[in-house]
Amino acid sequence: MEEYQGKATMEKITSLAKRRGFVFQSSEIYGGQSGAWDYGPLGVELKNRIASLWWKEMTRLQDDIVGLDSSILMHPRVWEASGHVENFTDPLIDCKKCKSRFREDMINDDNLTAKKCPDCGGELTDSRKFNLMFKTNIGAVEDSSNIIYLRPETAQGIYLNYKNVIQSSRLKIPFGIAQIGKAFRNEIVTKNFIFRTCEFEQMEMQFFVKPGTDEHWFDEWRKRRWAYYERLGIRQERLRWHEHGPGEIAHYAKAAYDIEYHFPMGWRELEGVHNRTDYDLARHTQFSGKDMQYIDQDSNERYIPYIVETSGGLTRSLLMILCDAYDEEEVEGEVRTVMRFHPEIAPITVAVLPLMKKDGLAELSLDIQNELKEDFATDYDQGGAIGRRYRRQDEAGTPFCITIDYETKENNTVTLRFRDSMEQVRIHRAEIAERLRKEIKGVK
Ligand code: ATP
């Protein structure tokens, strides 16, 4: 296995995330709820930033893609039509002795043949199909007539609305619909922090194309999604493609590639690009009795569009960004932990720090922070030695600090300190906003 080159470990990431308020365990005082996590003050900012960059990339910068926010609860027939009731299963195996539960594909072949538990050596049960959808009841009575599912993917809400979107926006094929939202899966094994959870967020885009042009668009979207991660500044040596082989491919897809990221625990899927063909819309036609064909006004042709999807996890992206940004270096005999977030992603863009609280420096700093608030995510910190405060901001991934001292009172200049190089320059107070904008733009 290729060795991981970064400084992060999952333990370090999990502990920094808690210490600095990125991610907390859900229901911690009750011993925690597995598969669920809470996003703290810095985490929610980071998550919103990742979502809004994706949204900008996939809607604002594309002429032919619009957004949607569909409901989590949908008619149960949707999941019969989509194939999830029948096919969205993992092979589950239990240990009769220690009661541990495994996904069959995660047990090595020797243990599987011997039917021996990898944990305790006890006897394993046969494999059985376990559906990953969360099922509950809607309304007052609990019976099979009112079953409802928590959606396991956001895509189906897009398919059901594709005709509404065409009619209300006059889009023509090829076009796409993008959506960010929660999805739920009853995952058998949830580990590695927020990598695989039961409640998570997806960022999905469904691109509707004419049959026959699907392979072109599939290649095109693979290129565009790769370029997106490049622009985000993700370390290229930690990204690679993985093509789904015959045993791996989902029930709805004709071709599938994953963009994988080299996490501390190994190469894992970050986002999938799938050619879903006309599978979903044809099945919805069959199950709903409604015609899901597209009518091409120019040529008078009718057809069920093919769909190329890009499907990524927002919460999984956040983990990737934490791992990618994590760095440690030795500075003056001490280890400096620094989160090297792209300035457009960093939860705090600029921290304003008075050298001392007294002599009006605190008031002056708050005044400067107020000027910057409208355009930047700011923080104010007056507690402790300045060196310690810089380290705190480094750990939070704040790319810029502005320090106010006695000279500021005399000539209105401040110190601008850069997170990555730790370089400091003196600039005029009136130049701060412009300079920050330039610095942010300058980062690839
Ligand atoms: P896996 O094989 O890892 O279970 P998948 O191939 O089923 O994933 P998709 O159905 O293609 O995943 O989902 C698209 C994206 O949604 C994934 O690339 C991932 O980023 C995210 N995702 C899927 N399941 C989870 C989960 N349980 N927790 C967090 N993110 C998830």
Image (cartoon, helix red, strand yellow):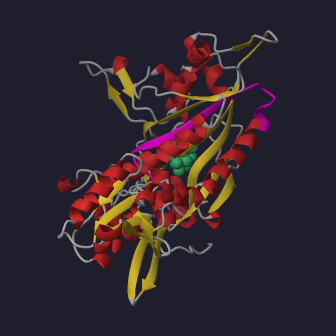
Residue shown at 51% from the left, 60% from the top? 107
Picture quadrant of residue 285: top right
Can you say whether 180 is above or below 437 in the image? above
197 in the magenta segment: yes
- Residue sitting nearer the eye, 291 or 378: 378
- Residue sitting nearer the eye, 344 or 302: 344
Task: Give the image location of residue 415, x and y in percent.
Answer: 39, 71
Q: Quadrant of the N terminus?
A: bottom right
Task: Give the image location of residue 82, x and y in percent.
Answer: 56, 27
**Residue 129 appears anywhere in the view:** no
Can you say whether 299 is above or below 218 in the image? above
In the rendered view, does 310 fall on the left or right side of 317?
right
In the rendered view, does 256 fall on the left or right side of 264?
right
Task: Give the image location of residue 435, x and y in percent.
Answer: 50, 59
**Residue 82 appears anywhere in the view:** yes
- Residue sitting nearer the eye, 112 or 344: 344
Residue shown at 62% from the left, 73% from the top? 2
Q: From this viewpoint, which residue is outermost toward the bottom?
A: 333
Q: Which residues are magenta?
A: 195-216
In the rendered view, does 213 fall on the left or right side of 431?
right
Q: Quadrant of the C terminus?
A: bottom right
Residue shown at 42% from the left, 61% from the top? 192
Give the number of marks: 0
283 in the magenta segment: no
- Residue sitting nearer the eye, 154 or 203: 203
Can you say whether 335 is above or below 440 in the image? below
In the rendered view, does 226 fall on the left or right side of 428?
right
